Amino acid sequence: MKVMNRVGGIGHNFWTKLPKWPTRIFFVFLIIFIGADFIANDKPIYCKVKGKTYFPIFKSYSVALGLAKWDPNFVNAEWHTMEYQKVIFPLIPYSPQNLDLKNANCVSPFGPQTVSRGKFWHILGTDNLGRDIASGMIHGVRIAYLVGFGAMFIALFIGLFFGVLAGYFGDDSYIVSRGRFVIMSLFLFLGFIYLIVFPYYNGISFTGLLFIILIFSLLFIGIKMFVNYLEAIKLFKKQMTINWDLILMRLIEIFKSIPGIFFLLAFFAIIEKPKLIYLILILGFLMWPQIARFVRAELLKIRETEYINMAKSLGLKDITIIWNHVLPNAISPVLVTLSFGFASAVLLESTLSFLGIGLPEGTVSWGSILNAARSNFSAWWLAIFPGLAIFISVYIFNRFGDALADNKA
């Protein structure tokens, strides 16, 4: 069983299945995604002021999380003009939102620039407001890949949940008490409403996410205890069969009938203050049906195999069989879908930010830089660099998907 369990799984040679150059480019983007603040930032990585040593970029993380406050000398600091005893700036000493008014109106990367020192040169030019394009491109990687990773994680979680239920249990093998069904349905419904209403009125922050997780954990424990009490009542103790396969297929048909781009436009039309987390949640919510469909199809084959029947005959619990023997064998088609889905998420984020919706006002992304090119057709750098970044990102993940599909075949 252990040997067969590895069939179709990720395996130790997963990365050898992927094409070399797209994989190398992906790792470059991944490094930029993780270290964007240390590559492009107006704050120094390290500085020494009046005999004291500071690490402003690290400090900014603590301030953002509410764990610390800025020193009074740095609250409204002009980092470029401060007097330092020692200082190390990032490779690109600009944040995406910095306005260099001396180099506004779309300064070319090869044209004359008004800068005090060579290290403040805008290597990819500026936009019409004087924002550094190189910094915008670096932080644009973080926006695009955060949307891609976040949306596909949510889609994967929902898709695996429904796909496993439909594929493993089918239409007649999931039996549950009426009490458990009623309470868990109510929990999911209220949870869904809570996830929509809470962010809308309170916003979503790191603390807010922790609060949501805590509330749901306590609710889940309480509901589990209440279900055990409810099942002691004869009416709620009676067993019922749930046709998960039918439910999933009807849900997929509903989602397939909704044009994604129009749903996104309608959603952000009624949102007062767009946030990145909203975009991630909605994209993940729209993309899960494809994953669920592939998981269901794979599990319909796997559940009839000899080693699954053997595991059932040994008395193993369904959750143990699913986790140890079913999911590892069903992961290959999911990886293919995730690769293509990631490319679609990046493209959708760029499309929405190009149209000026989906992200908070002033957020610089590849799409917003492309949008700036519309007002100045001679500023070729505003179209070439973000256009290439979008093309390369979509290309490498489509190549990943093709390679994984070929290896699966």
Image: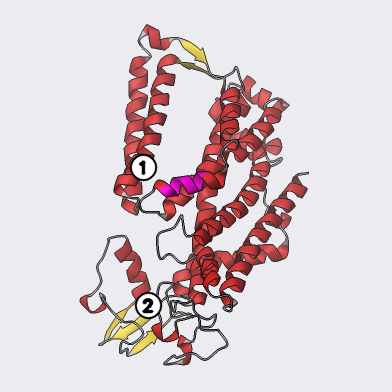
Secondary structure of the residue carrying tag 1 is: helix
Please name which of the two marks, 2 or 1, marks the residue nearer to the observer.
2
**Residue that badge 2 annotates:** 43
**Residue that badge 1 annotates:** 213
Instruction: Residue at the far top: name it.
Output: 234
Q: Position of residue 262 (x, y in %)?
A: 53, 45
Q: Position of residue 94 (x, y in %)?
A: 43, 78
* Residue visible at 73% across and 52% down in the picture: 402
Image vertical order of residue 51 relative to residue 162, above or below:
below
Characterize the local packing of mark 1: few (<14), some (14-19) or many (20 or more) Cα atoms within 10 angstroms.
Answer: few
* Residue visible at 64% across and 25% down in the picture: 311
Main SS, magenta region, reads helix
Q: Which residues are magenta?
A: 263-269
Image vertical order of residue 191 relative to residue 408, above or below:
above
Left or right: 345 in relation to 116: right
Image vertical order of residue 333 relative to residue 138, above or below:
above
Residue 322 in sight in this render: no
Characterize the local packing of mark 2: few (<14), some (14-19) or many (20 or more) Cα atoms within 10 angstroms.
Answer: many
Q: Amino acid at mark 1?
A: Ile
Secondary structure of the residue carrying tag 2 is: loop
Q: Are dots 2 and 1 in contact, CB under 8 Å?
A: no
Q: Position of residue 304 (x, y in %)?
A: 70, 25
Residue 267 part of the magenta-drawn span:
yes
